[in-house]
Image (cartoon, rainbow, N blue to C red):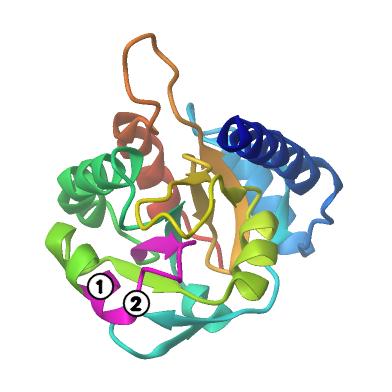
Amino acid sequence: MQNKWIGLIAALSLVLGLYLALVIAPPGFNDADEDHTSALSEKTEHLNWYPQPRALIDFELSKHDGTSMTNADLQGKWTLGFVGYTFCPDICPVTLAELNKVYPQLQQSVEQTPLQVWFLSVDPNRDTVERLNEYVNYFNDNFVAATGEHKVLYPLVRSMGMMYAISESTDNPNYLVDHSASIVVINPNGHIVGRFKPKHSPGELAISDVEQILADMPILLSADIS
């Protein structure tokens, strides 16, 4: 019974956190950001654009290769960002596998600005740098994985418009982590501009449709945003 209450509270916290992140958290943008967002949003079909680009908090994380990752690593490129953890039994491995499947086609669409895929682990207790390195390289050695302490991760994930919650005691070595399944899009100024939301179909895993990403991202990758 106690575990059920913990799971319910975690689920409610996840929903509330998502609402606060999307509605209350302040945006951060400049005039150029706003102009580009408005122009590009009219050309895409599937990307859920935020009303205004949103600034991420200042952060410093540990990357899978042992180096540090900061906001500067999001500058000058488009980024597809995804929150999860390596012990995730379904959403994370399937999403990364699907992104890997379309990655070559996305790279062929790059005209103006490079593209990177960023896997942000919200389970630093188990996801060491070594484990992240092995995990992300299994899918694609061009993908970036990173993690950090919860005091950095929670506000960072919230500023991305997403949320996560550990739904049970970490004394259980197989504990699960509830997390958003969307893939966010970060512009070359390091601001979140929108997200590809997961599909919810009966009997199917709720993950973002990479065919939608494949349809919309080339438009961004070929745009002149200078």
C-alpha span from label 2 to label 1: 5 Å
Residue 118 in magenta stretch: yes
Q: Percent from the top left, x then y, of residue 1?
A: 60, 29
- Amino acid, disc 1: Arg
Residue at x 64%, y 74% (from the top left corner): 152
Q: Residue furthest bottom?
A: 67
Residue 8 in magenta stretch: no
- Residues in magenta, as a range: 115-133
Query: Is residue 147 or residue 125 the one in the foreground?
Result: 125
Q: Is residue 215 above or below residue 115?
A: above
Q: Percent from the top left, x then y, of residue 23?
A: 82, 41
Q: Percent from the top left, x then y, of residue 58?
A: 68, 78
Left or right of 217: which side holds 225? right
Give the residue number, with chain letter if any, for mark 2.
128
Quadrant of the image occupied by residue 68: bottom left
Query: Is residue 226 or residue 136 the one in the foreground?
Result: 136
Give the residue number, with chain letter if any, for mark 1.
131
Circle 1: element type: helix
Q: Percent from the top left, x then y, of residue 128?
A: 34, 77
